[in-house]
Amino acid sequence: MCTLIAVADNAQSETAIWDPDEITITVQGGTHHHDLIRDLAALLADLGAPTTTGGLACFCGDPITIPQEAIAAGPL
């Protein structure tokens, strides 16, 4: 089962939180894309997901898609 990214409705203390029961990483909405990608990459590496040079990957190797509402408004 692939890792999913969910966006929190309320402010949370961390940018990305792992939920092993749901195989989901909950992220704080409106986070700057640099911070979000850095924190997601670090969390995925801690969890043993493969590192890639082309983006974020799930444990199975499939790419992870970040929901648009998770990223702060502005140019990428």
Image (cartoon, rainbow, N blue to C red):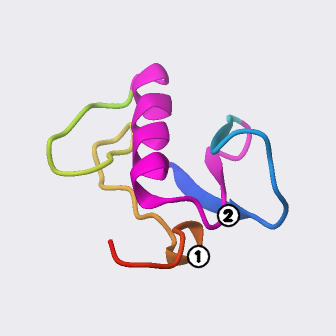
Kind of residue at badge 1: Glu
Residue 9 lies in quadrant: bottom right
Question: Circle 1: is it few (<14), some (14-19), or many (20+) Cα within 10 Å?
Answer: some
Q: Residue furthest right?
A: 10
Q: How many numbered circles are shown?
A: 2
Q: Position of residue 44 (x, y in %)?
A: 44, 33
Q: Say whether disc 2 or disc 1 marks the residue closer to the N-terminus.
A: 2
- Left or right of 60: which side holds 52? left
Q: Which residue is pictured at 85% across the width and 62% down the height?
A: 10
Q: Can you identify the residue that label 2 sits on?
A: 7
Q: Can you see residue 2?
A: no
Q: Secondary structure at mark 2?
A: strand
Q: Can you see residue 7?
A: yes
Q: Which mark is residue 14?
A: none
Q: Which residue is pictured at 68% across the width and 39% down the height?
A: 17
- Left or right of 24: which side holds 47? left
Magenta stretch? 21-48
Dots 2, 1 in contact, CB < 8 A: yes
Q: Residue furthest left?
A: 53
Q: Position of residue 6 (x, y in %)?
A: 64, 61
Q: Is residue 30 magenta?
A: yes
Question: Circle 2: is it few (<14), some (14-19), or many (20+) Cα within 10 Å?
Answer: some
Q: Can you identify the residue that label 1 sits on?
A: 69
Q: Position of residue 34 (x, y in %)?
A: 39, 52
Q: Position of residue 41 (x, y in %)?
A: 39, 37
Kind of residue at badge 2: Val
Q: Secondary structure at mark 1?
A: helix
Q: Is residue 24 magenta?
A: yes
Give whichever of 72, 26 is nearer the camera. Answer: 72
- Left or right of 3: which side holds 76? left
